Amino acid sequence: MSNSQMKHYDYIFTGAGLSALMTVCKMIQSGKFHDKSILLIDENPKKTNDRTWCFWSTNNTYWQEVISKQWDFALFANKNFRRDLDLHPYQYNRIRGLDFYNQVFDLLSKQDSITFLNQKVVAIEETESHVLIKTNSESFSGSKLFNSIYDSKKTESQSQYPVLQQHFIGWSVKTTTPAFNPGQATFMDFSVAQKGNTRFMYVLPTTENEALLEYTLFSHTPLKQQEYENEIQNYLEKLGVKDYEIVEKEKGSIPMTCYPFWEANTKNIIQIGTAGGWTKASTGYTFKNADKKSSELVAFLLKKRDFRQFHKKTKFWFYDLLLLDILDRKNELGATIFSALFKKEKPTLIFKFLDEETSLIEDLQVIWKCPKGLFIAALFRVVFKIK
């Protein structure tokens, strides 16, 4: 790449997904970066409702105005039992992708120092003093780079850390007759046939006649599209729904792994989002984790320069590793493990644990509900395999 006439930025984001946009928002909010030039590059213009994010919280967040629905109650089910969960003091929140993009881009458009380019990144190079980015039409240099473009080859070419996918297809449907309870979200309904995997239905009802239904798997390989859609149709039938219209469809595949993405960080390049291991490995939840990590990253930027110092490994990384080790070997055991957790434990403690905010005593309280033999065997495998 030639340096002649190349535009230089203080900060460049390759990929403008959830984590990048959250980080930029918080840089603006802090008021400490208004004199810095920031470039975001993404091949997707972020103008469609391409995804849904959900998270639980006990109080209002910065994203409050784009929350389209909140639930105070949830359902957990398998083929043997159903449990209604009172989430208080938490609420389960839903954000539509497009509403989030609109809120963020509205803020970005008011900043003179921020540029968004709808281009595809084709190469990233690093020199001693800066980073060079090449797109399909231009080149740029930057002092610091935040990369959220996920490279699946990295994780799939190694065998030390299991890699599963949380893959799903979702239908937003409108029914002619009332079919849903708009006050209750269905977290996991394992009553669907497991077929040797961890498979469940996830339902977010907005009214008695409208809901998003996602057929979801935690497994190694995606299915043919028809299989997900058949299962959604069967589930609607089971709910007694005969006449409905599909308003929107969405699909996704989120990597679930404890692979140490942060080892690729250098002094001036940091991996963020899914590419940085910001997705909660054991559940695939991303929004809350990205919200926390982006705040930590902005605080870090104000104090330190070397991105290799950002990541801290925690006990929760290890817990996730144990669960993934089990699901990697015996993928059909997901329903058993999650059912053991949700059958008797307080939902508030499970949320706190999944938010990585529990003490060691609380951790043990949660882990003790899980099938002990499975986790002890996984503990031995993991301890002796991973340094």
Image: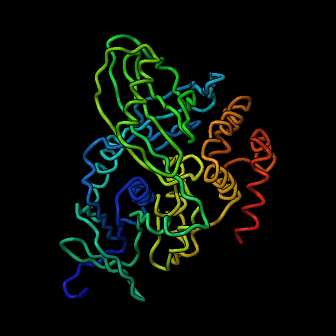
Image spot of residue 169 (x, y percent)? 39, 39
Say if 136 sits above or below 380 in the image.
Answer: below
Work out whether residue 228 or residue 188 is closer to the camera in this orientation and state it.
228
Image spot of residue 176 (x, y percent)? 32, 12
Q: Residue at x 52, y 46 (%)?
A: 285
Question: Which image quadrant for residue 78?
Answer: top right
Image spot of residue 337 (x, y percent)? 68, 40
> What quarter of the picture does the N terminus occupy?
bottom left
> What quarter of the picture does the C terminus occupy?
bottom right
Say if 200 sits above or below 360 in the image.
Answer: above
Left or right: 47 with respect to 216? left
Left or right: 84 with respect to 245? right
Image spot of residue 73 (x, y percent)? 57, 24
Q: Residue at x 71, y 31 (%)?
A: 346
Residue 179 in view here: yes
Q: Residue at x 41, y 67 (%)?
A: 147
Residue 83 in view here: no
Q: How many marks overall?
A: 0
Rendered image coloring scheme: rainbow
- Taking the view exactly as shown, the residue that stands out farthest to the front is 195
Work out whether residue 132 or residue 29 is closer to the camera in this orientation and state it.
132
Q: Residue at x 40, y 32 (%)?
A: 68
Work out whether residue 194 or residue 259 is closer to the camera in this orientation and state it.
194
Left or right: 265 with respect to 48? right
